[in-house]
Image: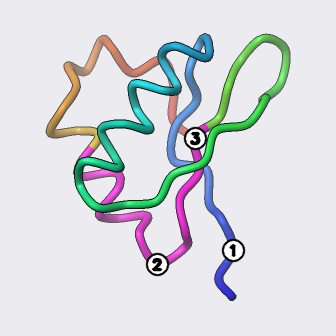
Amino acid sequence: MTGMVRVAVAGDVAEAEEIQEILRSAGIDAEIADGEEDSVTVSVPEGDVEHAQDAIEAMTEPEDVIGEP
């Protein structure tokens, strides 16, 4: 079993769910979880990290992404 790797940090659950939907529409399984302070993290299987980063980049404007790990 492969581990999950954090690919994005969102400011709230709604934003994390939006990123999760982008990833799912690209065929990537994504999980959201509470991060530090009030952030929410988005993680994908280890083997999908590069594809996930490409999908997030392609579907968001640079100023929309709050942070990356």
Q: Is residue 58 left or right of residue 33?
A: left
Residue at the extreme left of the image, as rendered: 58
Q: Quadrant of the C terminus?
A: top right
The disc placed on residue 42 is: 3
Q: Earlier in the sequence, mark 1 or mark 3?
A: 1
Residue in the picture at 55% in, 69% down:
45
Residue marked by disc 2: 47
- Graded by Cα atoms within 10 Å as few (under 14), some (14 to 19) or many (20 or more), the crowding at tag 2 reads few
Residue 19 in the image, given as x and y percentages of width and height: 40, 32
- Bounds of the magenta segment: 42-55
Secondary structure type for disc 1: loop
Residue 18 in the image, given as x and y percentages of width and height: 39, 24
* Residue 47 among those drawn in magenta: yes
Secondary structure type for disc 3: strand
* Residue 52 among those drawn in magenta: yes
Secondary structure type for disc 2: helix
| Cα distance in 3D space between marks 1 and 3 | 13 Å
Looking at the picture, the colour scheme in use is: rainbow
| Cβ atoms under marks 1 and 3 closer than 8 Å | no
